[in-house]
Image: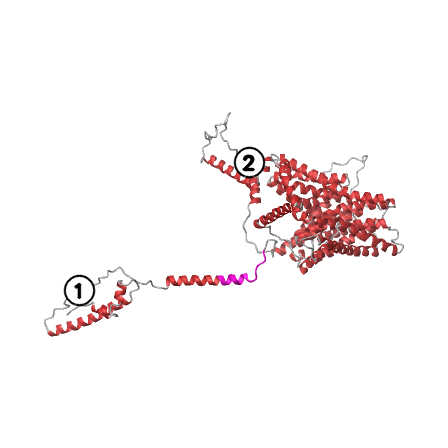
Amino acid sequence: AGGRLSRRLLGGLCVVGLVSAAAASGTEEEPYMDCNSSKKAFPVVTFNYHHVSDAFEVSLWILLASVMKLGFHLIPKLSSVVPESCLLVSLGLVLGGLSEAVGKVPPGLKSEVFFMYLLPPIILDAGYFLPIGPFVENLGTILSFAVIGTIWNAFFIGTLLYVVCQFSGGVLQDVGLLQNLLFGSIISAVDPVAVLAVFEEIHINELLHILVFGESLLNDAVTVVLYYLFDEMATAGFVSFTDVLLGIISFFVVSFGGILIGALYGFLAAFTSRFTAHIRVIEPLFVFLYSYLAYLSSEIFRVSGIMALISCGVVMRPYVEANISHKSHTTIKYFLKMWSSVSETLIFIFLGVSTVVGPHDWNWTFVSCTLLFCLIARVLGVLGLTLIINYFRIVKLTPKDQFIISYGGLRGAIAFSLGYLLNPNCFRRNLFVTAIITVIFFTVFVQGMTIRPLVDLLAVKKKRETKRSINEQIHSQFLDHLLTGIEDVCGHSGQHHWKEKLSRFNKRYIRKLLVTNERSKQPHLIAFYHKLELKNAIDLVVSGGLPKSPSSVSLQNIHGPQSERLIPALSQEKEEEIRKVLRENLQKTRQRLQSYNRHTLMADPMEDQWNQILLRRQKVWAMEKKKAKYLTVPTAKEGSPVVSRTRLYSDPVQIDTLENMPKITFDLASLTDREGSEFSQKRNDSLDTEMTKQCIARCLSDPGPSNESENDVFLTTNG
């Protein structure tokens, strides 16, 4: 009942949001008043919607999308089938349709807004939290897909579309080879926004995720170079060898220029964070500002802004997190996640709205061939490159991995924005934008909705949710050091050799420059215990456990005025740092299921049977020991009272000794008559018989030795 009520409330909020958005979109602007008009009464309440119309509508869109996300994740069946990006695009289509119905043109997705404000938060979030280890280990494969694969896709799609345009008749014959190659460079790149939106929901394994996402990040340099190169060539109308040579040089300038600019701002951010110990509030601000300045500086020099953001986030993170407080780290983490989520929401909503309200030039031949050639080029490129890459990889890419990489080449808003940047006077921009939107919708809806069932059907390995244990981390580091030593012995300068060199250079020079002195001299765990002992000493002094005045030995070489309290008190920031180090260095014990990893040894199939046999033998031995201890009577010594009493009447030799034993004679009754004497004699005989039987029974039933002496006296009666 509570779930149904919450869904109804969310549905009501969605309806109210849609009505409010439609009403806001349909409100007409009030004309400005003439300066020479007659004076009117001072308005107490005014309505000036046109002043905040765009901002108000966008805020309503974000609010409506957030409410729909809540309802979307409250329905597990829906969220397990439909990706969140499909929901946002559908919401954009509805909002665009409502705006068209009321006759109001809504704000569309402008290229400047996309590249200046919406794209940087998503890329910064991806670069700041990028897993460096898997990314560096697979860097060769990622570069192959990003550079060679993107160039192959651009030329394959552009060339085949040119052939189609030439044989399609007079409608598309004006689209030349350079224009088709320009369109191929726009549509060939894998979009990082779409990849993040889909791959994070299906929880694919880390290898496939880093390959596809790394390709979407690094192909930006190739896309930028090809876009500007073919744009200049198509505008000029001819191609020379010098242009091709300059284009190749421009690729290295764009890619490495973006990396250098991002690294420079990353080092500046790390160096600035050294001096923020007393002003913790502005620590997150430096991270955001330096990253955004790196992106803007790269746009000034027309180099890759995505590469600049990635390198800035990767460079600054280890040093900034060593300087800032735990609260600042939490602020950076959640603000980046929230900022990137809002940007992603707006991008997909704007895509839906622009699809409805934007101008289109639909051509079945061009659009269908574009979609078909994109799929074919992606599959052929991945298969061909994987065939070569697997010769150099230790962990080969299986056919299942190749299928997921091919199927995961999603297109998104970057291609859409680049299409809108084209000059409509020189190119068929509306035709290109229509084809781009069709490809985006196919990748988001069809591929995005079917990739999860395909992953489950092919039994592709999913992402490991739990972190590696301390044992695995120690063994991984041990193997790295071992391989480094083997490379040194063999005289081979491989990956591990250079990794060790960079690590030593970082600890010896860079870390001392960018990290505060207190933290750069000693490891985190030692620093934590030092602070913990210092805090315990302070507590002892405050509680009176130690004298407040220092000892004479500690004051031998101290001159000048002495303070009452030699040990300073820890501030709240220091305590937060201690808690942060504790969380980083102390591992919580927990039960874990056995899972495959490279440190797990293959089990012997007969090992379980031998273990069962060994356990059974141990149980049998334990039972035998218990029987020997509790179910047997200890043997008595020869000549002991027990043995003597037991053999008393069974051995004739022992019976003869009764005559020599002392006896006590007494009269049971003193009767004068004959009858009384005979009665007493019979009674004495019966008592003698009963006493003898009781004595024998007591001797035979004695369980063990007693404390009685060996000279037992047997009482007999004599009448």
Q: Which residue is at the front of the view, 517 or 343? A: 517
Circle 1 residues within 10 Å: few <14, some 14–19, many ≥20: few
Residue annotated with mark 1: 662
Report helix, strand or loop for mark 1. loop
Compared to residue 351, the image places residue 539 above or below, namely: above
| Residue at the farthest front position | 490
Asked whether 186 falls inside the magenta stretch, the response is no
Task: Tell me where residue 397 sits by quadrant.
Answer: bottom right
Residue depicted at x 65% and y 42%? 501
Report helix, strand or loop for mark 2. loop
**On residue 571, which mark appears?**
2
Q: Position of residue 196 (x, y in %)?
A: 69, 50
The stretch of residues the image draws in magenta is 601-614
Compared to residue 433, the image places residue 300 above or below, namely: above
| Between marks 2 and 1 in the image, the one whose residue lies nearer the viewer | 1
Q: Which residue is at the front of the view, 358 or 46? A: 358
| Left or right side of 49 for 170 | right
Q: Quadrant of the N terminus?
A: bottom right
| Left or right side of 528 for 270 | right
Q: Which residue is at the front of the view, 150 or 579? A: 150
Q: Please say whether residue 108 is visible from this viewpoint.
A: no
Q: Position of residue 231 (x, y in %)?
A: 83, 45
Q: Please say whether residue 596 is visible from this viewpoint.
A: yes
Give the residue type at disc 1: Pro
* Distance CA(mark 2)–CA(mark 1): 98 Å
Task: Tell me where residue 491 sits by quadrant.
Answer: top right
Q: Position of residue 614 (x, y in %)?
A: 49, 61
